Amino acid sequence: MMGFWAVFAELRRHPSAMVGLVIIFLLLVMSIYAVIRIPYSEAVRLWRAGEVVWLENPRNAAPKWYNWFGAGLPETIKIETAAAERTEERVGESTKRVTYRLAFDFPYKRFPQELALFFTSTYTTVPPQLVLSWRTPDGREIPLGTRTVRGVERYVLSGDSTLLRRLGRAPEESLFSDPKNPEQALSGRYELVMDVYTFEPGASLSAKFIVYGRVYGWAGTDHLRRDLSIGLLWGAPIAVAFGFTAAVGIALIQFILSGIGAWFGGALDILIDRLTELRMILPLLPILILVGMLWSRSIWVILATLLMYGSIGGYKTYRAMFLQAREAPYIEAAKAYGAGNFRIVFRYLLPRLIPVLIPSFVLAIPDYVFLEASLAVLGIGDPILPTWGKIINDAYSMGAHFKGLYYWLLEPAALLMITGLGFAMIGFTLDRIFNPRLRSL
Amino acid sequence: MAERSISAKETVRDQPNASQFLLNVSNLRLYFKTTKGVVQAVDNVSFSLGRRRSLAVLGESGCGKTSLARAILRLLPRNIHTFSGEIVLDGVDLMKLDEERFRREIRWRKLSFVPQAAMNALNPVLRVGYQVAEPLIVHFGLDRDEAFKRAEEVARVVGLPVDFLNRYAFELSGGMRQRAIIAMALITRPELIILDEPTSALDVLTQANIMNSLKKIKQEFDVTYILITHDIATSSELADEVLVMYAGQLVEHSPAARFYKTPAHPYAQKLMASVPTLREDKTLEFIPGQPPSLINPPKGCRFAQRCPYRFERCAEDPPAFSLDGGGVARCWLLAR
């Protein structure tokens, strides 16, 4: 039996295994980082919260690194009244006018995605009012109308149909367009001027202006403005845990069951063999879909179903190997000195075939990672957890590939492929190490 | 062959004082089912063995030596046709014990075994020391450390360097593995050890070494051996008694001193004549023909086909005749 370090030393001689180890190491680091950085409950809350939590993010924004390749996509700009230039003037007995100049640099050629103002006002009877106007870098001034702000409000300029009608074009485009080239944004310093009228002493209004860009974070956002990085990060621990648990669980149960069946033989052997044959004609995917539809789509239920389904498989091959190993002289010797059946099975019979077991379960891990993703893509994945499969499912159902939002599909797909690749590289090398006959191949 | 030598009558017939013997086998039959028919591997074998005696079981390949050992150990294959008779070990009738009691009370507590393929009889995934110690852990519930200490003691007795106990079986030479197996057989201090070809596949020096160890062990541990071998020269080193089998039957059971000088049964004589000697210049003899098939063996004496002294009575089954100087043999020539 090779020790761990002997196997590791052997692995080091294979570059592909080292690449695989590095990939798995990075995956583990990513998983640990995800779990520590965003606790489980927080991840679930963020992922399931819907648009409210993510209001300040752009919708369907590409990852920031798109700009490294010269995409020139605008980033999101946020300006708050608290940080803006402010002039105050008393215009009546209790009427006060505060002028805010929300100035920002817009160095992009592409138009922003949306424009929105978030207000918070305090008053007792008469709500504050405001007059908005827009100043472009070339000195034009465009009035944007007046508003009354009652409490907490959101005003989406880009969605204002009155404004659209008046400007003749979507506000986020017409306000930014270059008069010389209307299809391009004019870069330079813009200003949103807010004249806030308060009619009571103590009344106030604060605002935050957001110019939504078209890039966000390292992973981009989806149709619900969610930060994909949360889903991608959290997908790693879920994929690895699911794949590992399923693969190890199934391999071990199959292995032990086969060992016991082959050792005791007789009725037990026949029973397991028949169950295996029964299982062979039962299709996995429809069973999982049924369980998902009728019972629960929790990842644990799926895992349990998978364990039950998978555990009775593999008997045919393992049995053949165990039947051969059972006749080994040292097993007879163990029997002769009075070792009990379970001692023989667990100390003598099973360890004999561990070299076959280890590569097979390492190779099986990506299968289950992919299975979980496939279920999610089919819409029967866990509805709560952020997983790679679910991101692909969202992207697919929202037509990401038609809209050119390739990052949305390709990021989770790439992570899945890299995961599979890492385990496959190690698995094949382990197979070579443990099954020396393959070495010459 | 001094005061404890066993007379012919005692050997064959029921003993009033059976406890004098460690092992009493009577009318043991072990038949196997095969696709061609029933193989009578051990057919009606009876013998007794006293305490602290060594019995060499001789015979050519396929004569049922190993089957006899397996029948006593109850290490049986799955295709059993008949397994009957009586095996009394230290006053306990083994045939009446169920599998679980046999495992707990007999195996390795009273009876241990050094298997034929000793080279492969060690688990490749366990350290040798653990395996040597394992019977103590299984049968006496000793903890690991204590069992290991005992394993070290036994290893010293059999001449296995103590640091070898930390190795795996594949790191040991054939002789060392054989010693490890013998150590394993000794560790529970059983009364009877069955050695199935303990020195086959080893070079002569190692053979001699192991035979000497076995002799030493016999003195130190007060054990009784059943030594199964086809190597007559080796058996002479250790045996107090010799049991010769032919075609599944016992043909002669004699004290060693007499047997090696003057074997009684014609088959035993031929067998002895086939052994090369170092100094005498003699033509080695062989027995023409081959042993009969154990499926439907011939009636009467099974050796008759190949026997130079064959006569009419050989068509009948010969009973066991007691011999001068102790022992029994099944041959009509010895009828008086």
Image (tube, rainbow, N blue to C red):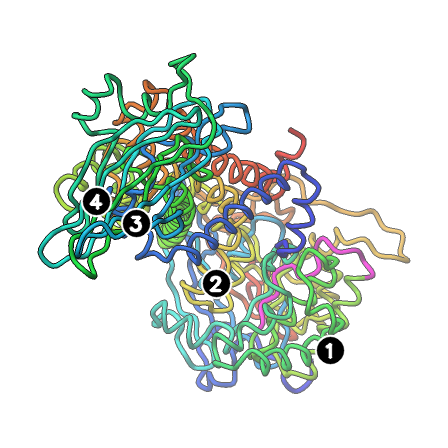
Chain to which the residue tagged by mark 2 belongs: A
Chain to which the residue tagged by mark 3 belongs: A
Task: Name the residue rendered at 58%, 40% in the picture.
Answer: A20
From this viewpoint, is residue B298 visible? no
The residue identified by callout 3 is A46
Q: How many residues crowd mark 2 within 10 Å: few (<14), some (14–19), many (20+)?
A: some
Chain to which the residue tagged by mark 4 belongs: A
- Distance from Cα at disc 1 to Cα at disc 3: 69 Å
Q: Which residues are magenta?
A: B193-205
Considering only order in the chain, which callout, 2 or 4, is on the residue closer to the N terminus? 4
Relative placement, left or right, of A217 versus A269 is right
Which structural element holds mark 4? loop
The image shows residue B128, relative to residue A56, as above or below, that is: below
Task: Name the residue rendered at 56%, 51% in the picture.
Answer: B63
Q: Position of residue B84 (x, y in %)?
A: 37, 62
Q: Please check the rendered image and state whether residue A405 is part of the magenta-colored stretch, yes or no.
A: no
Q: Are marks 2 and 1 in contact (CB under 8 Å)?
A: no
